[in-house]
Image: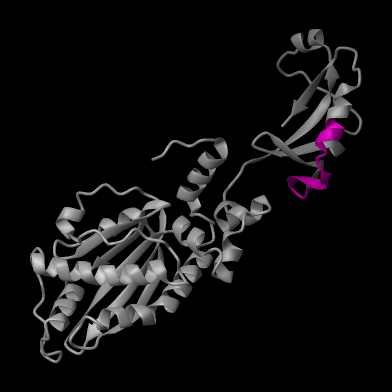
């Protein structure tokens, strides 16, 4: 991983690993679906131009994923990683054995109505070459399409079999996976496109209004982290100022000693979370339960001014 140049980049990287690039999965999925729907007709045309029989390609699913999940392949699958100027793994394309069989069958003019023999072994050099050709056509459309504009580094690297690909080191991070179904009457397979969320949103920010809205820097804490952080549990502490006394008086404290509350102590309770005061409250009781009623937000500047007032070398005593 490249060295972080400042704390902002480091914080952004940590947040990306926790909640994704935006923390809003629905926006990421919407951006990916919008992109693939726009390029799919051109992808189909590009692939069919090299095949002897027509095929159908449809969107099977669009889902949030991790980059490392692209490694989960069988030995008979084909995979290729395509880089771009902004990412070494801007697009990971994989085809399962059934999809490779469909491509090989239609490329060499097999009868589309005859059942396709399943591939249950490592791919042959010819099958790898056919898969690479299909990957090249898909990547070319995505890279050059006005709707996507990923500027991928082409040509696509030669596809690897699943066993070989699993040996490759993949960085982890939030991604989105688009699964396409490629079919002929005799059978069907799937082709998966895995893209890092950051690459998807960065490359399409200027072309898709949905992505533009999702990728805008958040203007406040709640919007930035959405539900992922807003559902986090925090411990609240209510602190009451008992009074002020000298260090000498504090040193004479003994077990069982009763400390008298100063006048107005109950109305100056501070409600805090992780050491940060949030509200000034009023301490009370409702039935058998003790309560604090929120009076107003804690004013840090006012509290600072109050602390500057002389108190004759006395020290505050608080109770939580």
The answer to which of 22 and 101 lies nearer the viewer is 101
Residue 179 occupies quadrant: bottom left
The answer to which of 208 and 311 lies nearer the viewer is 208
Location of the N terminus (image quadrant): top left
- Which x, y percent locates residue 5? 51, 35
- Which x, y percent locates residue 193? 34, 66
The answer to which of 16 and 254 lies nearer the viewer is 16
Q: Say left or right for 250 vs 25.
A: right
Residue 106 occupies quadrant: bottom left
Identity of the residue drawn at 34% across and 58% down: 153
Q: Say left or right for 159 vs 23.
A: left
Location of the C terminus (image quadrant): top right
- Confirm whether residue 307 shows in the render: yes
Identity of the residue drawn at 9% across and 64% down: 125
Identity of the residue drawn at 37% across and 80% down: 42
Specify start and end residues of the magenta stretch as a single range.
286-303
Identity of the residue drawn at 36% across and 72% down: 141
- Confirm whether residue 96 shows in the render: no
- Which x, y percent locates residue 272? 71, 38
In this rendering, the answer to whether 176 lies above or below 279 is below
Q: Give the total of numbered labels.
A: 0
- Which x, y percent locates residue 29? 47, 68
In this rendering, the answer to whether 56 lies above or below 22 is below
Seen as rendered, the residue at the extreme bottom is: 113
Q: Is residue 206 magenta?
A: no
Q: Is residue 291 magenta?
A: yes
Q: Say left or right for 101 vs 17.
A: left
């Amino acid at each position: 991983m490249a060295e972080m140049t400042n704390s902002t980049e480091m914080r952004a990287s940590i947040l990306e690993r926790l909640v994704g690039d935006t923390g809003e999965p629905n926006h990421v999925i919407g951006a990916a679906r919008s992109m693939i729907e726009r390029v799919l007709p051109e992808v189909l045309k590009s692939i069919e131009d090299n095949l002897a029989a027509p095929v159908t390609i449809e969107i099977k699913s669009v889902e949030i994923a991790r980059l490392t999940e692209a490694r989960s392949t069988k030995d008979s699958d084909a995979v290729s990683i395509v880089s771009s100027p902004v990412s070494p793994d801007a697009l990971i394309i994989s085809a399962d054995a059934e999809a490779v069989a469909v491509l090989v069958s239609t490329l060499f003019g097999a009868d589309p109505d005859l059942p396709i023999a399943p591939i249950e072994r490592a791919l042959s050099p010819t099958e790898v070459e056919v898969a690479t050709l299909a990957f090249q056509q898909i990547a070319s459309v995505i890279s050059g399409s006005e709707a996507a504009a990923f500027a991928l580094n082409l040509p696509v690297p030669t596809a690897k079999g699943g066993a070989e690909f699993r040996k490759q080191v993949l960085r982890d991070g939030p991604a989105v996976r688009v699964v396409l179904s490629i079919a002929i009457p005799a059978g069907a397979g799937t082709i998966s496109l895995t893209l890092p969320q950051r690459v998807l949103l960065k490359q399409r920010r200027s072309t898709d209004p949905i992505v533009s809205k999702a990728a805008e820097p958040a203007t406040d804490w709640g919007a930035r982290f959405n539900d992922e952080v807003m559902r986090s549990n925090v411990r609240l502490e209510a602190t009451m100022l008992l009074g002020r006394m000298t260090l000498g008086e504090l040193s004479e404290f003994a077990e069982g000693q009763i400390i008298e509350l100063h006048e107005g102590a109950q109305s100056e309770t501070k409600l805090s979370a992780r050491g940060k005061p949030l509200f000034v409250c009023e301490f009370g009781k409702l039935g058998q339960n003790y309560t604090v009623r929120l009076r107003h937000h804690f004013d840090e500047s006012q509290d600072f001014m109050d602390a500057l007032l002389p108190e004759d070398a006395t020290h505050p005593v608080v109770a939580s």
